[in-house]
Amino acid sequence: MGVLLDKYSGSFTWFSLRPPNTDVENPYTIPYSHVDHLRRPARFPGLRQYLNLGPWARSAGREAAAFGRAQNVDVVLADLALEAVVAGRVAARILKVPLLASVKDDPVNRIRVKGTPAWLVKWFDTQFAKTMRTADKCAVIGNAMGEVYQRRYGVETTTLFIGVEKDKCLPARALDRDKAPFVIGSVGSVNYADNWNLLVEALRLLNQKYGSGRFRLLHIGRLPDGLQVTDDVAVTGWVPEKEFVFHLSRLDAGFLNYSFAPAHAETGRTSFPLKTHSYIQAQIPMLALGPADSSSVRFVEEYQCGVVCAEADAGTLAARLERLFFQKNVYTEAQAAVEQLTRLFSREQFFQTFESFVRVANKSN
């Protein structure tokens, strides 16, 4: 959202369902108001969550509408997470303006995987479906999510991927097959320990075959406790942007993955890893590990920007890495495809798509 506010601050008013962080200065001189969600009854978290997602969200939507009317808003752009699923719909209905939905993580699946009671997940699912069918258009994080929502709710979707700034992209480096080590990069959060362990084991197999230290895993960020860290793994911890870019420049390939566990199937189909942005910036091929219908595997296959492994098997994963680094032209062609992505998913294209998204919604009403 910050990228859009930086670019279009004169076109936004901002109504937040959370109080501002008093430790962070708000740099945007735009009309702003907020409410705060219920924190009681503390002893009954399921009930509190329902009250926030339902009755309180409707009340917040009415307050948002009153604020929006005072600012003469033309459209409601609702980031559909938690209470905004209901509040955004209510605000747009009261104001009688188009509702533009935006989804980065599937809201229903998000509360499901956190152990929310089944009855509440079912109720929230009906609310999300109602909002999606009410929305004039929906911005999604990736094409795979868009396909699911079009089929499930009949809503028109637009993929809004933040894109890279061309002048911040690193120069593409030709692969030197004589170098050691080849560095596989992992960026940010690590959510699937099983996949991490598969990658570590695959590198062990490759180093056993090609010599100690030939392949190495570099994680830029912090690791959760309990993850396997061997001599083939290096971890930077959280680093400032300048140091982050330096570490990106060390990578030869970027790791994307989604869990093979059935409980995470919906996440794999509808989410999209933002670390893809970092790998495009670094102009390196990608290694996608996960089910065949997961968004990261489909992305790499669609754009031919790396190699994929749709089996939860370290030997198969090692073979895919061998193909990327040692089979003639595979690395070069994948890197060329990534260079194309710097134009297809540029920051300029992101802004153009957003402007079209808003204009079409206004014209339809």
Image: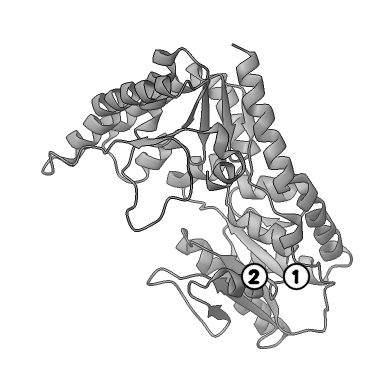
Q: Give me the disc on residue 245.
A: 2
Q: Quadrant of residue 175?
A: bottom right
Q: Which residue is mark 1?
A: 322
In which quarter of the view is residue 143 placed? top right
Task: Determine the residue located farthest toward the front in the rendered image.
Answer: 29
On the image, the x and y values in percent for residue 150 come to 59, 24
Question: Considering only order in the chain, which callout, 2 or 1, is on the residue closer to the N terminus?
Answer: 2
Quadrant of the frame with the C terminus = top right
Placement of 9 over or under 218, stated as above or below? above
The residue that appears at 32% across and 41% down in the rendered structure is: 18
Cα gap from disc 1 to disc 2, whole angstroms: 26 Å
Camera-side residue: 313 or 13?
Answer: 13
Q: Residues within 10 Å of mark 2 (few under 14, many from 20)?
A: some
Task: Describe the element under mark 2 as helix, strand or loop.
Answer: helix
Image check: 359 left or right of 44?
Answer: right
Q: Residue furthest bottom?
A: 212
Percent position (x, y) of residue 119? 27, 29
At x 57%, y 51%, the residue is 273
Q: Position of residue 68 (x, y in %)?
A: 42, 24
- 1 vs 2, front mark: 2
Give the residue displayed 66% in from the left and 88% down from the top: 212
> Which amino acid type corresponds to the residue marked 2 in the rendered image?
Val
Labels 1 & 2 near each other (Cβ < 8 A) = no
Q: Examine the rendered structure and indicate whether residue 99 appears above or below residue 114.
A: above
Q: Residues within 10 Å of mark 1 (few under 14, many from 20)?
A: few
The amino acid type, in three-letter code, at marker 1 is Glu
Note whether residue 325 is visible: yes
Please indicate whether residue 216 sits to the left or right of residue 196 in the image.
Answer: right
What residue is shown at x 44% (from left), y 24% (from top)? 71
